[in-house]
Amino acid sequence: MRPSTIPRLSPADGDAAYAAAQKVVDVHRKLAEWLRPGVTLAQIDTLVGKTLDDLGCKSCFLGYRVSEDPKDPAFPSQACLSVNECVVHGTAGYYTPPMKVGDVLKIDIGVAYHGWIGDAAWTYVFGPPSPEVKKLTDCGKESLRLGVLELAPGKTFLDWARVVQNHVEKVCGFHLVRGLGGHGYGRTLHAPPFVSNVLPTYPREWPDAHLACEPGTLIAVEPMIAVSTGKTKQHGKKWPIFSADGSQTVHYEHDVLITERGPWVLTEGLELVRDVVPC
């Protein structure tokens, strides 16, 4: 185990990060009560924008670029809205049909609030879930819960991945999406460390794997799971990302501050939102 070089938050910083994270939860609560079959991604994105404005926040996704290269496409939506086989980074315009019973929608909200970022995703099912979708959503939520318990002093980020991968792939028989994972954040949306959901398969594949979980470290952790593949595809654009075989996907994400006493889930309450949309 090598010591972390990741910046640590002060107690006051932790309180500010918590306030931003709770704004994300507030938006999810609003959406959970409002969602219904027949709404479109464009309508959902409009409500996200209005809710953020009402809460005194702004989206940290809208206009986001992966690099400073102006040729990189800026993300065009308030939120990431990803339907069924779309794993992450779905835009408000990539999918135009209204939501119908049986659809699985991943909603990823990123806010900027008083100089701090909040970033968390949850998966919503329209109408009663099929047995496979119920197993998939249960798997995603439980893998996140189990993994967060590993984010404590004396552990490494490898411990997170080991627990998450074991639950998803060995216990549940699904597949974690390769190449995507969690990340540090704080006053910017993305920062070190990278937090993979799967164990490395060769030396230095994941340089941050053996970093110590040190108090003051702020991370967004996010299992992304598909029914039958860990591979992805894109249709010639930066956004969105799909499962390679078109199988159903889920995405769950919490913001976590590692403390002396263990993990503090800053987006606490998100797991209590109504995530099955009534017909």
Image: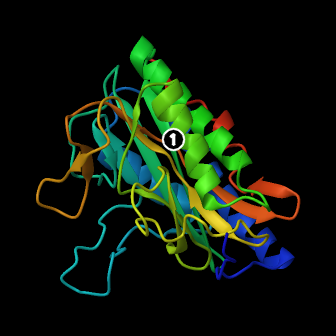
Q: Is residue 140 visible?
A: no
Asked whether, in this view, residue 91 is left or right of residue 145, the answer is left
- Tell me where residue 86 sits by quadrant: top left
Q: Residue 269 at x, y = what percent?
A: 71, 43
Asked whether, in this view, residue 261 is left or right of residue 150, the answer is right
Q: Residue 3 at x, y = what percent?
A: 69, 77
- Tell me where residue 117 sits by quadrant: bottom right
175, above or below 193, in the image: above
Secondary structure state at the residue bearing disc 1 = helix
Residue drawn 48% across the image and 37% down it: 123
Asked whether, in this view, residue 11 is left or right of residue 227, the answer is right
- Tell me where residue 61 sits by quadrant: bottom left
Q: Residue 250 or 31: which is nearer the viewer?
A: 250
3, above or below 103, in the image: below
Residue identifier under label 1 = 165
Which quadrant is the N terminus positioned in? bottom right
Q: Residue 103 at x, y = what percent?
A: 34, 27
Which quadrant is the C terminus positioned in? top left
Question: Amino acid under label 1?
Answer: Gln
In the picture as drawn, the residue positioned furthest to the front comes out as: 203
Residue drawn 29% across the image and 36% down it: 229
Q: Residue 236 at x, y = what percent?
A: 11, 60
Q: Is residue 161 visible?
A: yes
Residue drawn 80% across the image and 62% down it: 153
Q: Residue 224 or 187: which is nearer the viewer?
A: 224
Residue drawn 40% across the image and 17% down it: 132
Label 1 crowd bin: few (<14), some (14–19), many (20+), radius 10 Å: many
Q: Residue 76 or 192: which is nearer the viewer?
A: 192
In the picture as drawn, the residue positioned furthest to the left comes out as: 236
